[in-house]
DNA sequence: ATGAAAGCGCTAACAG
DNA sequence: CTGTTAGCGCTTTCAT
C-alpha cells in the first residue's frame, strides 16, 4: 500500500489529525509544525487519498461528464473547456462515453454518482423522466436539454438556424431541405421549429428529410433522397451529416455549392478542413463547458436549496464555401 | 445522504455484513435471504458505494486514461475501445486531457493515482524518468512509448512508413520530405528512423522539415517551406498536419496529388472526409485501446510481480487520393 | 449461513 | 495549537 497519513504522522512525531489539518486547514497548524509535516510528507511522497477524504467530507472533488460520443467532434472542445474550468476550482472531471445508448447512459450515471459531486450531462439521450429521478441522487447540469429541477445550459441553435435559412433564401433558394437529428435530441427539435418558422417567414418551401443517423454515414445515405427532392439548399443537423451529404451528392454528380448549397452545424474541425469549406452554425461549445461547470459547482455547494438556473448561449452563422447563389433549376 | 448498506440491513432485518455479502459474494448467502435483501435494496434504490468499497478492498474498479488532447481525432477511437473493454471487465474508465502539458500530465497522474487501480498513458509527453518514478505508485500501461517496468502497447508505425515511402518511390517521386511530430514523441522518432532507412533503400532523397506543431496549423504553416524544398512527395506526422499542409499548398497554387503527393498517419475522420481523400497509414487505435486495458488489468491483478509485457500492433498503408504519379518537375 | 467486531484513510467535533 | 475519539460505507476475519 501507498504511504498514508499515519506514516507521515509517525515520521514527524505528531498526531494524524495534525497531519490532516496541515493539508485541509493549514491555518489551524503552527508554522513550525506545518513546515515539518510538509517536509516529511514531501520526503515520503505522501499524497492525500481523495477517495478516503470524500468518505468523511461527502465531497469527492470530482465531476462526471457524460457524452454520447467522444468521437463526435462537437464534444472535445466542450470537454476540454469543462476540464480546464474545473481544474481551476480544484475539481477533476471524469469523462464517460455512452455510445449513444440510453441504457448505458443510465448505468454510467448510477455508477458514477457516488464517485462524483455532480454530473454534467451533455445532449442526453435519456428521457426527462429518468433524468429527473436520477437528479435527486446527485446534482446535474444538463447541456442542450430542458430538464425540470436541473440547471441547464442551452445553445440557442434557433438563432443560427434562422440566420441560415435567411441566408439561403437571400441566395435565391426557394426549395429547401432540413436533415434533422435523432428524435430524442432537444437541439434537433429546436432546429426543426426554427427552420420551419424561418422558412415560412421567408416564403420558401421546407422539406424535412430525416437521415439514418447523426453521422457522415447518415448524410451519405441521405444524398439520393436529397438529390431527388428537387431542393437547392440543405440545412443539416451537424457538420458530419453535411460532410457526408456533400460526399454523397458528389457521387450523384452534384456539386456543392454549384448545384446545391449545404449548411452544417458545429463549426467542427472536419468542416473547416473540408473542401469546399463548410458554411456552418457555430455552437459555443467551450463557453457551454465552462458555464456548465460553474453552474454545477454552484449547485453542489448550494445543496438541495439551489434554484435551477438556465443559461442561454448564442449561436451564429459562419458563411464559408458550401453555400452560393442558386443557379439551377 | 444516499441510502447505505445499513438502511438495507435494517429494512431487511439482517446484519450489514450479510447485505455486504449479498453483493460481493452472493454464494455465501442463503437464497431466501439473498432474495429478500435484493428486493429491499431494489426498493430503496440502493447502490453499493464503490469508493467506500475501495477503501477496504484496495480496488476501486476504476481505470485512468490520460491523453494529450481529446480533440485530436487519433484518440477518440482508442478511448471508446478502452472504455468498452473495461466495461466488460466491470471496470470504469476516467478520461483526462493533459493539453499537451507535461506538468499537467504529472499532476493528473498523481491525483488520479489513488482513485484508480491503474493508469493508461497514451503517447505521454512526460519523460521516461518521471514515468518510471510514478510507476511504483500505480500500475501503468503505456501506449506508444517504451518505458522500463511498464507494460507497453506499441503501434508499429515503422511498418506503415516503410510502405508509404516505397509507395511514393514507386510512383516516381525521387525527392521526399518528412514532417515529423513533437520531439518527445516515440512515434515520431520511429517514423523518422523508418523513413530514413526506407528512403535510403529505395534510393530516394529525404528531407526532414519539422512543423511548428502536430496540428493542421503546423501543416499549414509548413506549406511554404515544403513548396520551396523542391520535393514532390511528403509524409506527415499525422492526418491533421497533412490536411493543413494540403490546404497551405493550395494557397501556394499547388495541387495534391497533381503537383505533390501527401501521406498522413492515423486514418482519421477528417482525412476520410477530405477531398482529395487522404492516403494514410492506419493506426490500430481500437485494438490498442482494448489491448492496453487487458494488459493493465493483468498488471493490476498481478501486483508487483507482473512482468512488463510488450504488445506490438501492425500499421498499414491505405492508398486513397492524395498520392499519385510524379508529373513534375 | 449469519452476526460481531475491527479497520481501510481520512476528517471533524471536542477537549485540553 | 494539538491530541483524543468517533465515524464515513463497506469488507473481512472470526465466531457462532
Image: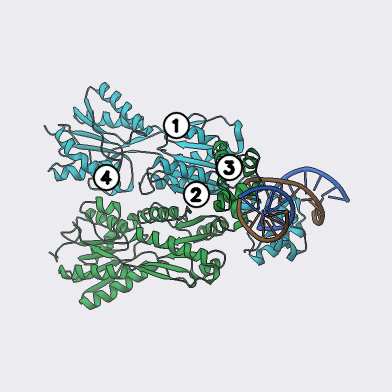
Chain colours: A cyan, B green, C blue, D brown
Depth check, mark 1 against mark 3: the one in front is 3
Residue under label 2 = A94
First in residue order: circle 2 vs circle 1 = 2
Q: Chain of mark 2?
A: A
Residue under label 4 = A216
Which secondary structure, mark 4?
A: helix
Quadrant of the drawing holding the C terminus of chain A:
top left
Q: State the separation of the CA atoms marked 1 and 3.
A: 30 Å
Residue under label 1 = A128
Inspect this view and state whether residue A321 appears: no
Depth check, mark 4 against mark 3: the one in front is 3
- Say yes or no: labels 4 and 3 on the same chain: no
Characterize the local packing of mark 4: few (<14), some (14-19) or many (20 or more) Cα atoms within 10 angstroms.
many
Depth check, mark 4 against mark 1: the one in front is 1
Q: Chain of mark 1?
A: A
Characterize the local packing of mark 2: few (<14), some (14-19) or many (20 or more) Cα atoms within 10 angstroms.
many
Q: State the separation of the CA atoms marked 4 and 2.
A: 28 Å
Tell me the number on the disc at residue B37: 3
Amino acid at each position: 500500500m501507498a504511504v498514508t497519513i499515519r506514516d507521515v504522522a509517525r515520521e514527524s512525531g505528531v498526531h494524524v489529525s495534525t497531519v490532516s489539518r496541515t493539508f485541509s486547514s493549514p491555518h489551524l497548524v503552527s508554522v513550525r509544525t506545518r513546515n515539518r509535516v510538509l517536509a516529511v510528507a514531501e520526503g515520503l511522497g505522501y499524497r492525500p487519498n481523495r477517495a478516503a477524504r470524500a468518505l468523511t467530507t461527502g465531497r469527492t472533488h470530482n465531476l462526471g461528464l457524460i457524452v454520447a460520443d467522444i468521437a463526435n467532434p462537437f464534444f472535445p472542445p466542450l470537454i476540454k473547456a469543462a476540464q480546464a474550468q474545473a481544474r481551476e476550482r480544484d475539481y477533476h472531471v471524469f469523462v464517460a462515453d455512452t455510445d449513444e445508448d440510453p441504457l448505458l447512459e443510465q448505468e454510467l450515471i448510477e455508477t458514477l454518482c457516488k464517485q462524483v459531486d455532480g454530473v454534467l450531462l451533455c445532449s442526453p439521450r435519456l428521457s426527462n423522466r429518468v433524468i429527473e429521478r436520477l437528479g435527486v441522487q446527485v446534482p446535474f447540469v444538463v447541456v442542450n436539454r430542458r430538464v425540470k429541477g436541473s440547471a441547464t445550459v442551452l445553445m440557442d441553435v434557433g438563432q443560427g438556424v434562422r440566420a441560415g435559412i435567411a441566408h439561403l433564401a437571400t441566395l435565391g433558394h426557394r426549395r429547401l431541405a432540413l436533415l434533422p437529428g435523432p428524435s430524442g435530441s432537444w437541439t434537433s427539435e429546436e432546429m426543426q421549429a426554427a427552420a420551419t418558422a424561418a422558412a415560412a417567414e421567408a416564403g420558401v418551401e421546407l422539406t424535412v428529410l430525416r437521415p439514418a443517423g447523426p453521422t457522415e454515414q447518415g448524410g451519405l445515405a441521405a444524398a439520393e433522397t436529397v438529390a431527388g427532392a428537387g431542393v437547392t439548399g440543405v440545412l443539416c443537423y451537424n457538420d458530419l451529416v453535411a460532410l457526408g451529404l456533400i460526399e454523397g451528392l458528389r457521387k450523384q454528380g452534384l456539386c456543392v455549392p454549384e448545384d446545391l448549397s449545404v449548411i452544417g452545424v458545429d463549426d467542427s474541425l472536419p468542416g473547416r478542413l473540408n473542401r469546399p469549406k463548410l458554411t456552418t452554425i457555430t455552437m459555443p461549445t467551450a463557453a457551454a463547458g465552462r458555464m456548465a461547470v460553474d453552474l454545477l459547482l454552484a449547485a453542489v455547494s448550494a445543496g438541495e436549496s439551489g434554484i435551477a438556473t438556465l443559461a442561454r448561449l448564442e449561436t451564429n452563422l459562419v458563411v464559408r464555401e458550401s453555400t452560393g447563389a442558386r443557379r439551377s433549376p
